[in-house]
Amino acid sequence: MSPAGESGTPVPGVDLRHARDGLSTAEVRERTAAGRINSVPTATSRSVGEIVQANVFTLFNGVVGGCFILLLVLGQWRDALFGLSAVSNSLIGIIQEYRAKRSLDQLAILQAARSTVVRNGARESISSDELVPDDLVVLNAGDQVTADLLLLGESPLEVDESLLTGESEPVPKQDGAVLLSGSLILAGNGQASVLRVGPETSAYRLAAEARRFSLVTSEIRRSLEKVFTVITWLLLPVALLLTNAQMQDQGGWAGAMGSGRWVPAVVGAVAGIMAMIPLGLLLMTSVAFAVGGLRLARQKVLIQELAAVEVLARVDVLCLDKTGTLSSGSMVFDAVHDTGDGRAGGWRRAVEWFGASPDASSTAAAIGAAFPAQIPLTEQDSIPFSSARKWSSVTFAPESAAPGTWVLGAPDAVLGSPGCGKAHGRAVALASTGLRTLVLAHFPGPLAPDAAKVDLPPELVPVLLLTFRESIRADAAKTLDYFRRQGVTVKIISGDDPRTVAALARGVGFGTGAAYDARTLPRDPLQLEETVEACNLFGSVTPSQKRDLVQALKRRGHTVAMTGDGVNDVLALKEADLGIAMDSASPATKAVARMVLLDGRFERLPAVVDEGRRAISNIERVSLVFLSKTVYATVISVVTGILLLAFPFLPRQLSALDGLTIGLPAFFLALQPGGQRYAAGFLRRSLAFAVPAGICTALCVLAVSAYGQLWGGHSLASAQSAATVTLGLVAAWILVMASRPLNWTKVLILAGMYAGLVLLFTVPLTQEFFRVDWPPAGLLVPAVAVAAAGCAAIEIIGRLTRRRPAAADGPGWDL
């Protein structure tokens, strides 16, 4: 038979001489030396160049850099300190993301897809990027196709090509069919020859793009982009307005340019522009994401997309696949049970055949351990197991020791005829005890050619029942209890018998009710939503139904995480907001998951959720401080420009206050533990506090500055020092509000901030460098009084606008 493609036409360039023993070592070396290997881009994060570019070449950095150079040219290097801040922001962002990249890339290498090939007549496991043309690849259910292959032999496969075509229905593949890279083997096993590798594969572009660094849909990032867009549009008009005001304050444009007083005017304008830019906000967001991914990596959790930590914080429904998640996934044979309908001769040899496959599932492997076969019978025909059919079959010759057709599968799928009622009742009783139950049935002749697509013959006779035990993970009950306490709804969605699912759920303290039989799920989308909302246990769920249940939950407004380890979980994992694969997961499952528990410990999930909540909770805290600063800086700049007043600060004074009340404290706050479940509306909540708090701060500063410059008869330097005192105290209280509830770590951070403010005004070196002498008493008292009033107003604003953090934030108190 000539090799054929899917259309039945010969496939050029295919060498079937290696279809039995595979390539030799010399042939592999020859192809490898010629560069014909399956090497494709596998980066899970941005390249070093992309990281540097993203952190350095930004609009705000361009503005900051231009102002920095301008002040250096004017000889005002002390007022150019904000440039060092921008440089340090970029360096920190680059270092943090690079560390996370290196960690993720190392873990990704460990988890890279592997292929089983036949070379020199023996099987061996190799990295998929080592495949060469004409390699003989062994395929099993759950494998991901990583090169274009030609299916060989008579064993049919069921293939999921949804990653390529979007079509979720399995596609049957026969001898001579082409398997495209990116498709997934759902059922069956066989061998295939490598047609095309690397860039030659038809799915190369898709595969390369799917493995590239990408950001999960992130409300945090979208919200910050809106803020930055508004600031960008405001910068130019405010800069022009402020520059004109500073020139007019220095005697007008002509007078300032002629006398040289335009230099302090430019310095004042630069101070206002720099104050408007929240330099560290995006940095803190990136740092929180990167540190979250790094911390999870140390706990053997691979985050395939860094911004997935935000999804962790938003999860309110966790869907669990029973096998491999609540249970260890390992099966141990329990016993053989009589069906009451008699036993056909040769059943033991049939059972031996089902357990003898070298590519057997965990259940079949348990059968093989209990019924070892010296020499398995040779079959005439067989149908591989499919999660959609839930049965497999084998047909032996009439003269063999086990003549006829034997069907092994789930009782509900096999025992459908009216005469099987007694055996079905027995299977129900066994499944209700928590045992996994399979039935072995017999048919005297071969099945119809299209038996895999139609119902089994009614003459099928149940021969015996096989039961298996699953070991429950020791940490399952504790982990489920954690999620209940955290307000995360847990739903167990399994393909096993509903009675088995309910029994296992009772074993981990998950209620006492029955599991919903997914075969009776309503088809109407609204009814399906109501059902999945009301029920938490589902059994006999097909892969497509798992996906439908996840979609229904998302339509109800839930943020859904889904865990799984089998290829039958792939569709649901792809659809979930966050797919989590266990270490025992098939390569196909890991390929579509955004997170992999590398050591398979279910108890890692609470730490995973906590890390996401910690990151987002801290980002929201930090945003309150940065956005408040942007608001008060913008208001001060606009009012100063309209009233033609001197700007109340020197750039160096703002740099000192930014470092003490925002930069350093915010950095440490962004790394604090704890956090509550994230709720939508990040920008609305942040601005609800930041806008009134920023306006209040601006009014305090403007009042003190105007009093000092216009009515108090004080010098500009004294007025600027008084404004610095006021801003320092009010901005510090904004940070106190953002830090609530307090714990000892936060108290130390805040104490350090206040100590820094005291040193700023008392140490001669800092006084001289930042030009912050203590204002005269006639100006100091009003400055402190106005600051106290501002702090009181901000306290009221905070209590009216902010949600009280949940207890998950750790021990603390509200001041």
Image: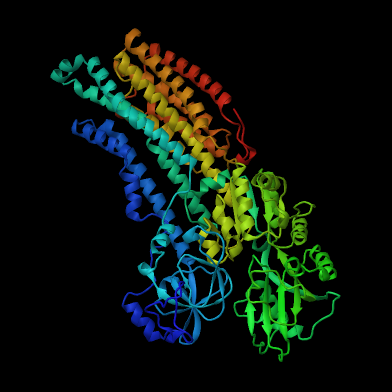
Residue that lies at the very extreme toward the left in this rendered image: 258
The C terminus, quarter of image: top right
Q: Quadrant of residue 661?
A: top left
Compare residues 427 and 709 and report the one nearer the observer: 427
Q: What percent of the width, then of the height, locates residue 795?
A: 54, 23
Compare residues 799 and 156 and report the one nearer the observer: 156
Is residue 4 shown to the viewer in this render? yes
Q: What percent of the width, then of the height, locates residue 769?
A: 30, 29
In the figure, 157 relative to 631: above or below?
below
Q: Quadrant of residue 56?
A: top left
Q: Quadrant of residue 726?
A: top left
Q: Which residue appears at 42% of the width and 54% of the height?
A: 213
Is residue 673 shown to the viewer in this render? no
Q: Which residue appears at 45% of the width and 67% of the height?
A: 181
Q: Which residue appears at 35% of the width and 79% of the height?
A: 31
Compare residues 799 and 492 and report the one nearer the observer: 492
Q: Is residue 519 left or right of residue 426?
A: left
Q: What percent of the width, then of the height, locates residue 678?
A: 57, 40
